[in-house]
Image (cartoon, helix red, strand yellow):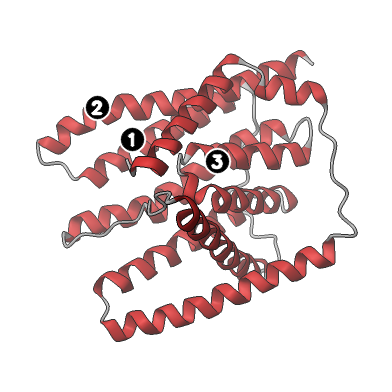
């Protein structure tokens, strides 16, 4: 019980450690950008430093074992299946955001990947999307937080690590997608006892989004039209595939019951509550004002 309480508090401290480092370095990065440093390079440095620091803190304080980073002992068909699920989730997320925009006029255009005509900026952005996020976010959320909570309840670990993963992105328009993506990555990482699979799928998710963005940015009108048609068909296929999975599994899924003390220790502490408030305010600001 005492170990559980301490582990849950350490997760809260680690989340704030990451946020505070990002905020602190963000102010310093502003000075470097003013002096001519690429904004994307500054963001890469900030992300790596904060996530690595948070991961090291959790691994040392919670005495985590070294995660398996080089095992490929999983069915290779999982990769295309996961990608199909990701495409379907994107469609559902987009439909939901479009509905919110139509009904309430809520700002929903908060894409993180924005290209420019500066090649160096685009290269540094690609490094951030293809290396920093898939590796260092996975080490923090699936390599540390997930595995700490898995000591006490597996499904709770998958759910909470995914919820915090989505919350940390501070983007309400992507919350549903990011949460579901986190659930998929966490489930596969624990099922096959390796970090390789979730890092790989995270990389594929980011890579296709970046590729589409490049094609839209640099492509001709005809190419963009063709891409829209292909992606629409692929996402519809993915959405239907998700429905098939849900209907097949619906009768056999038993909703888990989380231990009360685990819920209380994870969520009812001041650092976690303040972290929620900070992220929710940030998401609401983005949704209402686009900032």
Counting every numbered tag in the picture gives 3
Task: Give the side of residue 115 with respect to residue 99, left or right.
Answer: left
Crowding at dot 1, Cα within 10 Å, few <14 / some 14-19 / many 20+, comes out as: many
Crowding at dot 3, Cα within 10 Å, few <14 / some 14-19 / many 20+, comes out as: many
Can residue 235 be seen by looking at this rendering? yes
Q: Where on the picture, by quarter, is residue 5? A: top right
**Disc 1 or disc 2, which is closer to the eye?**
2
Mark found first going from the N terminus, 1 or 3: 1
Mark found first going from the N terminus, 3 or 2: 2
Cα distance between the residues tagged 3 and 2: 24 Å
**Disc 1 or disc 3, which is closer to the eye?**
3
> What residue does disc 1 label?
46
> What residue does disc 2 label?
27
The residue sitting at 45% across, 82% down in the picture is 229
Residue 49 position (above or below residue 79): above
Where does the image place residue 203, in percent across and percent down from the top left?
48, 58
Checking the image for residue 165, the label placed there is 3
Cα distance between the residues tagged 1 and 3: 17 Å
The residue sitting at 75% across, 13% down in the picture is 2
Task: Give the side of residue 264 with respect to residue 84, left or right.
Answer: right
Where does the image place residue 275, in percent across and percent down from the top left?
51, 25
């Amino acid at each position: 019980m005492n170990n559980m309480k301490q582990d849950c508090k350490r997760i809260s401290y680690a989340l704030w450690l990451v946020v505070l480092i990002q905020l602190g370095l963000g102010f310093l990065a502003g000075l470097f950008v003013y002096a001519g440093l690429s904004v994307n390079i500054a963001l890469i440095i900030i992300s790596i430093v904060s996530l690595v620091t948070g991961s090291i803190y959790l691994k040392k304080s919670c005495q985590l074992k070294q995660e398996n980073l080089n095992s490929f002992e999983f069915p290779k068909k999982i990769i295309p299946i996961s990608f199909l699920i990701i495409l379907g989730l994107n469609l559902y997320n987009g439909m939901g955001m479009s509905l919110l925009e139509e009904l309430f006029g809520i700002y929903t255009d908060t894409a993180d990947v924005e290209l420019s005509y500066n090649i160096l900026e685009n290269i540094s952005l690609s490094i951030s999307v293809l290396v920093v996020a898939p590796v260092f976010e996975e080490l923090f959320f699936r390599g540390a937080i997930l595995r700490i909570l898995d000591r006490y309840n597996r499904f709770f670990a998958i759910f909470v690590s995914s919820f915090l993963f989505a919350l940390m992105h501070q983007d309400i328009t992507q919350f549903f997608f990011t949460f579901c993506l986190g659930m998929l990555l966490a489930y596969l990482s624990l099922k096959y006892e390796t970090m390789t699979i979730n890092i790989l799928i995270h990389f594929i998710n980011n890579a296709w989004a970046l590729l589409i963005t490049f094609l839209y940015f640099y492509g001709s009108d005809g190419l963009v039209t063709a891409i829209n048609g292909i992606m629409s068909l692929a996402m519809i296929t993915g959405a239907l595939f998700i429905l098939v999975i849900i209907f097949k599994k619906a009768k056999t899924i038993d909703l888990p019951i989380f231990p009360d003390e685990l819920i209380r220790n994870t969520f009812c502490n001041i650092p976690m509550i303040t972290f929620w408030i900070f992220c929710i305010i940030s998401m609401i600001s983005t949704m209402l004002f686009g900032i």
